[in-house]
Amino acid sequence: MNRMIMVVALVLICRVQVEAQNLKFGEISQQELLEKEYEHDKGAHAVILYKNRDTYLQSSGGTNHLITEVHERIKIYDQLGFDYATKEINLFKQRHDDEMVRSIKAVTYNLENDKIVKDELRKDEIFKTEASYNYNQVKFTLPNVKEGSVIEYSYKIVSPFIWNIDEFRFQYDIPVKKLRAEIRTPKGFRFKQTPKGYYAVFPKTTTKRDNRIGMDVVINTYNLEQMPALKAENYVDNIDNYRSGVIFELVSIELPGFHRSYSRSWSDVAKTIGNSDDYKNKLDKTRSFDDEIDSLIAKHSTKMDKMNSIFKFVKDEITWNGMDGKYFFNGLKKTLKEKKGNAADINLLLVAMLRYAGIDANPVIISTKDNLVPLFPTIDRLNYVLAYATVDEKQYFMDATEEFSDLNVLPIKDYNWKGILIDNNDMVWKQIDVASPGVSSNFYALDVDLNEDGTCEGSCKTRFDKHSAYRFRKTYKEKELESYLTEKEKSLSNIEIDDYRVEKADTFKGSVSESFNFYDDYGADVIDDKLYIKPLGFLCLDENPFKSETREYPVDFGYPFKDVYMVNIEIPEGYKVDFIPAPTVMNMPDKVGAFKYIVAQNGDKINVRVNFEINRAMVPADTYPLLREFFKQVIAKEEEQLVLSKI
């Protein structure tokens, strides 16, 4: 991340020397309402006209709170910008403490008959829900939003977590015209400020007396203008990792006669979690399940078989409630009774059962992809726990929350950065690598009977393993068969599918396969008694997923893969081969990708053999131009047509 920030060519935003004047709520101009587009990004559906954020400490009645005040004004250009009229405020909670939002005020402004008309948000249009184990959410949608509207809202967050300062975010999915952010921290309380993203923003720092807490404070003020939108791209792990912003970490308190360091290593973080009640006392309470496990493991003699049976038992018996978590939500006993729990309930139960069976098992704490990459050692940035075991000197990572996960085949969201091992028994608390996803092999076999009128029919067989099998099973189960086949036909150039069969889609072990017969109205083009056909037919890659000429963040495929295609085309009687595409072999530098393409005639058949490989789950941004060109050449090759003519 630091390397990205240091790329001077990308640093378009610098410190603004003159502080922006704070705009007052409700001071809307006709010019803002008449504006039809944003001059610096004419394709933008909305723009943040102004955003102000103030974060400071407040002391009252002997209690300290962290206060964050937000004021935001947004211009809506068209219907695709209506989504920005809905605001979601996430409020952190932990044990018996939680953040609160107060003083919500929201107004929509429209221009009617040259007059500015206001529609105010009512209190009954504000909704609070439990978003996850650690977050509540307050949500509201501004009323009467139209094309051309300006919306404005403000609110105050009151937090008891006075040293946990939320990230200051400077970049959004839409452009920002003007933004001001200020944070006041007590003098002597030293915070490390870690910038993130590709656009560096530097603060102006001053010191003054703050009567709200009765001491001097250090004021860091950020002012910026014309921040571009962060554009979404295909194959991104979590776009928020690359947004311009700054993260704050309390590293020490240095006051006269008092000094304390809060700077942590990942070992410190691991030990702190390991010393919590959940991990130190509750994890090994086996009386909750000993009878069930005794009968289960009695059937097996090897540790590997015991681990597989326990893993399957937890997956079959306990349902994930959709909540992340590194601490218990229900606890072992209640989870077994209700057969439901959060990620920690399920995977810590798995760890406890594996230990009971004599298997060396421990928790590994991670931050999932949807929870960002931790930029420094912190407990708060970790949100999930995996089960980790060692059998015959081999490492196995498990996530029993997902029906189709397997040993070392985790949900893709789990492959994010590293993990923190909590081994209280051996007093080992450290950072470790989570096993990378292995190469998924995908096999496609296509037999094609080509007709003189350009139609074709035949059969298709496919087989997937590892993460490709996991993804297939998950997608297949989530849809009704009719809906699944309709989408599949559409994705395969609108062929007609018949006699569809699938094997091993209802288990999580081994490969999964499917087969079907097909009919294609447009298998070949017929021009002047000649047939023109793409050798891979409806299996060819027809669109480059990488459209932007440049890219500022890595490409995340999720897992490496190897696609193998074997196509046999029956030459229609009375036809001969006029043209066969030449064989091709392409290799990307550092073995990132490879493509091998061979088309040959064998009697009355055309045999097509294609290998397509991406050998890295994550491809760095500086390799993007080569990757984009690689896909472009693959598509061009697969577009080349086989030509048959009448004898």
Image (cartoon, rainbow, N blue to C red):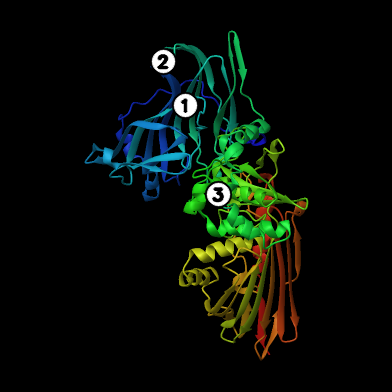
Q: Residues within 10 Å of mark 3 (few under 14, many from 20)?
A: some
- The residue at the far top in this view is 256
| Real-space CA distance between mark 2 and mark 3, rounded to the nearest whole angstrom | 51 Å
Q: Is residue 509 above or below residue 314?
A: below
| Image spot of residue 164 (x, y percent) | 51, 28
| Image spot of residue 628 (x, y percent) | 65, 54
Q: Residues within 10 Å of mark 2 (few under 14, many from 20)?
A: few
Question: Which residue occupies the foreground of this view, 308 or 64?
Answer: 308
Question: Which residue occupies the foreground of this view, 254 or 643?
Answer: 254
Q: Is residue 429 above or below residue 300?
A: above
Q: Is residue 10 left or right of residue 146?
A: right
| Image spot of residue 321 (x, y percent) | 48, 51
Q: Is residue 567 above or below residue 83?
A: below
Q: Is residue 515 above or below residue 7?
A: below
Q: Is residue 321 left or right of residue 291?
A: left
Question: Which residue occupies the foreground of this view, 575 or 587?
Answer: 587
| Image spot of residue 555 (x, y percent) | 63, 49
Q: Name which residue type carries label 3.
A: Ser
Residue 620 disc label: none
Tell me, yes or no, if residue 131 can be seen here: yes
Q: Which residue is mark 1?
A: 181
Residue 288 disc label: 3
Q: Nearer the viewer, mark 2 or mark 1?
A: 2
| Real-space CA distance between mark 2 and mark 1, rounded to the nearest whole angstrom | 19 Å
